[in-house]
Every structure is written in structure tokens, then in C-alpha cells.
Image (spheres, rainbow, N blue to C red):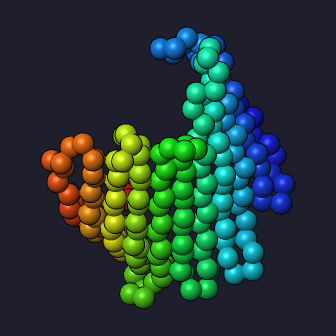
Amino acid sequence: LYNSPEWNGFNLSVAYGGNERSESGTQTNYDAALNYDGSLSDFDINASVGMAIQEDDAGPRDRNYVGSVAVLHKPTGLSLSLAGGGIPDGARDNYAKNGWTGDPLRTGFTALAAEYYDGRHWVGAGTAAKARGVLAVQGFVDLSLETSVAYRELSFSDPWIDTFRDIVSVLVGARWKF
């Protein structure tokens, strides 16, 4: 594993793992990522692109590519995060989340967000997974307390099996720091 020194907000990470045993013989793994963490005017930006390659005795087997970017507009508290990845000519997934953070109640921070996920072909050809949700977090600085609530809808489909039901979840939580 190697992480380069930071240069103007950029750094490079690479990893190698060799001679690992797998079902098909000896497996070798290569990973690389280019990361950015910085600011541009009123925006905080974090971004990464990466790839992972697995090879075995027969040659290249799996190639995965991923990327993400998150942007925060500091004066307004508005944010956007996007991520995606996949395998060439195969599975892919995409994720998006937009949000806002501020302190309208003057008790600590308030955070609101909406998210969406779409994944295709990860389990098999034609399969699809989707998720969408909304969430809120409220901080109470004087009480060292954070409260949260989230609503999420999840679905999965498979062209060969027609028995999957959608799921709805509601999460309510609190964190007290002492």
C-alpha cells in the first residue's frame, strides 16, 4: 500500500496483493485511486476516482471502476454528492444525495437530505436494485445531543424470480455524548 504526499489537494493511492489463493488458482489484486480534497472559492470539494483489477492464473478476471464527488457550498449549506461505479459491459451502480445544513433553530445544526440509488446487474443479468429516501438530523449543542429520523424505500427485481417485495423503513435515533 502506498499513499503519496498531498500536492495541491491531490494524492494518489496504490495497492498490490499477490499470491493470494482463490478457487481458480493464485490471485493478484491491483488497486489505484486518485483523490482530491480542497476548496475552490465558496465550495469545499472532495472527489475520487479509482479502479481495482483482479487477476488469476488465467489472466485478468475482474475490473471495477468507481468515482465520486461531493461538493458543499459553504455560504448556503447546500451540498451534492454523486457516486458511480461498475464493471465494463456488466454491473453498474449510481448514487446521488443532495442536502442542506444550517442552524435555523439556533440549537445546533440542522441537516436535511434526499438520496437515490440505482444498481443494475450486480446479482445477475437483468437484476435491479433501487433505493430512495429522505433524512433529517437535529443537533442540540447545549444537551450534547443529536436526533435523527430517516425514511427509505428499497426495491429489488430479478427477471427470473417474481416474489420480491418492496421494503419501506423508518429509522429514528438519538446520540447523546457524555
Q: Position of residue 122 (x, y in %)?
A: 41, 43
Residue 140: quadrant of the picture: bottom left
The image position of residue 43, as x and y in percent, is 67, 76
Is 175 or 171 nearer to us in this picture? Answer: 171
Q: Is residue 166 above or below residue 15?
A: below
Residue 8 visible in the picture:
yes
User: Residue 22 vs residue 164: left or right?
Assistant: right
Query: Which quadrant is home to the N terminus?
Result: top right
Q: Where 53 falls versus 163 (above or below)?
A: above
Name the residue: 66% across, 54% down. 48
Q: Residue furthest right?
A: 7
From the viewer's perspective, tell me whether residue 94 is left or right of residue 57.
left
Counting labels gives 0
Q: Residue at x 54, y 56 (%)?
A: 84
Quarter-wise, where is residue 41 in the image? bottom right
- Residue 93: x and y, percent? 47, 53
Q: Nearer the viewer, residue 167 or 80?
A: 167
Can you say which quadrant of the picture contains the C terminus? Answer: bottom left
Q: Is residue 106 left or right of residue 54?
A: left
- Residue at image position (26%, 67%) is 151
Residue occupying image coordinates x 27% and y 51%? 157
Looking at the picture, how far across and down is residue 134, in whole percent? Answer: 33, 71
Closer to the camera in the image, 30 or 80: 30
Q: Please, is residue 163 above or below residue 30 in the view?
A: below
On the question of residue 143 being in view, the answer is: no
